[in-house]
Image (spheres, helix red, strand yellow):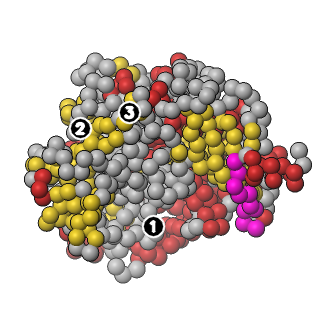
């Protein structure tokens, strides 16, 4: 069809789906514009941006949809199907024949888009996110689709509400909070998402408690001291999505409120939205994004989404066809999430000292079947996907932080913590020592919440190489780089109490980390997705391991970026809370630490620092950069770094040297 005739048709009526069985009913395009003023991105040429909405209809009686909690209670159209829609955002070569045949679908994190900045090394908004154009130069079609119903801004899922034969469904909901300074009111929502509104605002059944530790005793706060509302000009105005406490919420303490809500959204349709859009682009004739292969990529919450997606069998569409060919679940640790149960809030996660006991770090953790000796349950993350015969190629990539804050070791250890778990042939695991949840800024900075400066380790360079390796693995079965992660067998993985961290002046090795617990949400959670225990009952903890360290206190093993292999400082994946924020023995979410080496031997000995100084390690700047280059070339040879990125890595190391030798 002539493009000049196609565009008006798309803008006015959307794109009708030809195949009767497809579950994308139409795509309505609201905007279609050139990217970066028509700039050419290598062999892929110019790109265009397409935004709009995609409309779906699913059969609630189809076996592939029965996993979606409450889909049977959603309204149906005349054909008996459940309808919903999502926001859509695409960056694609204007001439699809110049692309590489692969779509890279980023699972949006709370409505946002991150992979262009992450892989392109972009900065800011607008054309700044395109950076050096890496993803476009490779020819990927880049796709985002809304899957989360409660986001305030960005890409969103528009899903129906479940009812009980047209009667409102109610249920118990829980929200918890930890603050870094004293506040007097707070939203019931999490990380900027919309809250589940409370009903019966004055009910005496509702409970607000406070405790000082994760497993500490919950102390009941008198009902008369708090209410649902927000402060406006010093007065409390009723608001079912906010809570206010007389005297205020104190920093460093855990507050938790349990209340009733109604009209649960069918949140699991977000999983179906991703499944059906990807399937549509792969298998159905369309003019938007026809591709041969699709890779799924997700950061943090979105990485956990992909693990959840695979666990619940969504990599098979309604016709049993494989959806994702490859998956990169990045910094998701051992978790899944609140993505498919009644009154689920997808933003809820689990961290060292926030958002406690939501369905995130729950059994099973490993891809292969294991039996929990405490409960007798046997399961594996990929058990159902394997039975469906739709196993994708999978990369699990984690920084050191996920071992302290996301129970990452659980994905490759036995459930009793006594041995390394077997890995499936379609899976690779990579971890980046000294890294934090998101690559930190350089130079390192201390923020209000932390005791120390952040770790600036930049492993995004390696993620570019791994992305191309994953694409090649799905395209031609070319073997990717070998897995690199800490193991019990070689002593690079240990219990926290066994870590031999050096006695660095002014540094206290943490006594706590995020643990994974056996959590009882009630008898209907596993079978029906209904939580009846709020708060849930907490059982025995799983043995969570962390990487062992070297003499400098840097995590061993893994993909050691040159700035880690040739260090100027000890970089750790943990950072305790600043005493001014309360709970100074607890860890800050997502953040690592930076402890510089002394510049000279004299400085080191004066401070009583056991780590060699910079002058004892490197004779000159030139020698240091030479060692950096050797370390980088080793990564290139192993497939963990692209040769084209060597200049950037070396330039960053030069900046680090200048920073390290300055007076501090």
Residue mark closest to the camera, 3 vs 2:
3
How far is the residue under mark 3 from the one under mark 2? Answer: 23 Å
What secondary structure is the magenta-colored segment mainly?
A: strand
The disc, 3 or 2, on the residue closer to the chain's N-terminal end is 3
SS class of the residue under badge 3?
strand
Locate the N terminus by quadrant: top right
Query: Residue 441: which disc?
Result: 1
Query: Residue 167: which disc?
Result: 3
**Percent from the top left, x then y, of residue 190?**
35, 53
Residue mark closest to the camera, 2 vs 1:
2
Query: Residue 159: which disc?
Result: none
Give the left or right position of residue 293, taking residue 144 as reference.
right
Label 3 CA crowd tier, 10 Å (few <14, some 14–19, many 20+): few
The disc, 3 or 1, on the residue closer to the chain's N-terminal end is 3
Q: Mark 2 points at which residue?
A: 534
**Percent from the top left, x then y, of residue 16?**
75, 39
SS class of the residue under badge 2?
loop
User: Which of the two residues, 363 or 34, is positioned nearer the viewer here?
Assistant: 34
Give the left or right position of residue 65, taking residue 533 as reference.
right
Residue 640 appears in the rendering = no
SS class of the residue under badge 1?
loop
* The magenta stretch spans residue 35: yes
Q: Which residue lies furthest to the right in this view?
A: 2
Which residue is painted at 9% across and 53% down in the image?
222
Label 2 CA crowd tier, 10 Å (few <14, some 14–19, many 20+): some
**Percent from the top left, x then y, of residue 50?**
70, 54
């Amino acid at each position: 069809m002539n493009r000049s005739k196609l565009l008006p048709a798309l803008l006015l009526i959307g794109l009708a789906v030809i195949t009767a069985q497809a579950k994308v009913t139409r795509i309505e395009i609201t905007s279609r514009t050139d990217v970066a003023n028509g700039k050419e991105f290598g062999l892929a040429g110019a790109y265009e941006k397409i935004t709009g909405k995609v409309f779906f209809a699913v059969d609630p009686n189809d076996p592939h949809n029965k996993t979606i909690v409450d889909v049977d209670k959603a309204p149906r159209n005349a054909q008996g199907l459940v309808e919903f829609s999502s926001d859509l955002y695409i960056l694609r070569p204007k001439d699809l024949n110049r692309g590489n045949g692969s779509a890279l679908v980023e699972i949006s994190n709370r409505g946002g888009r991150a992979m262009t900045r992450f892989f392109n090394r972009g900065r800011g908004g607008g054309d700044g996110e395109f950076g050096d154009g890496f993803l476009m130069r490779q020819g990927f079609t880049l796709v985002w689709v809304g899957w989360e119903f409660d986001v305030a801004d960005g890409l969103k899922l528009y899903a129906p509400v479940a009812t009980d034969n047209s009667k409102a469904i109610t249920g118990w909901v829980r929200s918890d909070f930890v603050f870094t300074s004293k506040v007097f009111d707070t939203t019931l929502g999490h990380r900027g998402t919309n809250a589940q509104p409370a009903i019966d605002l004055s009910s005496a059944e509702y409970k607000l408690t406070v405790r000082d530790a994760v497993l500490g005793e919950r102390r009941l706060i008198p009902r008369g001291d708090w209410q649902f509302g927000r402060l406006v000009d010093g007065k409390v105005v009723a608001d079912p999505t906010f809570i206010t406490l007389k005297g205020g919420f104190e920093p460093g303490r855990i507050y938790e409120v349990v209340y009733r809500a109604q009209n649960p959204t069918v949140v699991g349709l977000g999983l179906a939205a991703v499944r059906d859009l990807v399937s549509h682009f792969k298998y159905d004739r369309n003019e938007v994004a026809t591709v041969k292969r699709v890779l799924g990529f997700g950061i943090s919450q979105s990485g956990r989404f992909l693990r959840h997606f695979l666990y619940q069998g969504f990599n098979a569409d309604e016709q049993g066809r494989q959806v994702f060919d490859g998956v990169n679940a990045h910094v998701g640790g051992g978790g899944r999430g609140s993505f498919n149960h009644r009154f689920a809030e997808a933003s809820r996660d689990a961290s060292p000292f926030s958002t406690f006991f939501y369905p995130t770090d729950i059994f099973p953790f490993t891809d292969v079947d294991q039996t929990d000796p405490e409960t007798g349950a046997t399961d594996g993350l990929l058990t159902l996907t394997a039975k469906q015969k739709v196993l994708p190629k999978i990369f699990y990539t984690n920084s050191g932080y996920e071992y302290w804050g996301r129970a990452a070791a659980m994905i490759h250890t036995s459930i009793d913590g006594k041995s390394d778990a077997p890995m499936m042939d379609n899976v690779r695991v990579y971890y980046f020592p000294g890294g934090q949840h998101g690559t930190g800024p350089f130079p390192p900075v201390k923020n209000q919440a932390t005791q120390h400066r952040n770790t600036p380790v930049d492993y995004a360079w390696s993620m570019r190489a791994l992305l191309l390796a994953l694409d090649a693995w799905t395209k031609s079965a070319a073997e990717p780089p070998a897995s690199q992660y800490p193991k019990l067998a070689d002593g690079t993985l240990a219990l926290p109490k066994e870590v031999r961290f050096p006695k660095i002046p002014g540094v206290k090795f943490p006594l706590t980390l995020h643990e994974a617990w056996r959590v009882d949400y009630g008898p209907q959670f596993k079978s029906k997705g209904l939580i009846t225990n709020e708060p849930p009952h907490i059982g025995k903890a799983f043995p969570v391991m962390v990487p062992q360290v070297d003499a400098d206190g840097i995590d061993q093993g893994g993909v050691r970026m040159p700035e880690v292999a040739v260090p100027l400082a000890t970089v750790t994946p943990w950072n305790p809370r600043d005493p001014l924020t309360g709970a100074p023995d607890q860890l800050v979410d997502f953040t690592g630490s930076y402890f510089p080496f002394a510049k000279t031997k004299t400085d080191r000995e004066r401070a009583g620092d056991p780590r060699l100084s910079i002058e004892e390690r490197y004779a000159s700047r030139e020698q240091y950069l030479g060692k950096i280059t050797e370390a980088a070339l080793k990564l290139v040879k192993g497939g963990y770094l692209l040769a084209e990125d060597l200049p950037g890595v070396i330039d960053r190391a030069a900046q680090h040297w200048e920073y390290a030798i300055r007076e501090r």
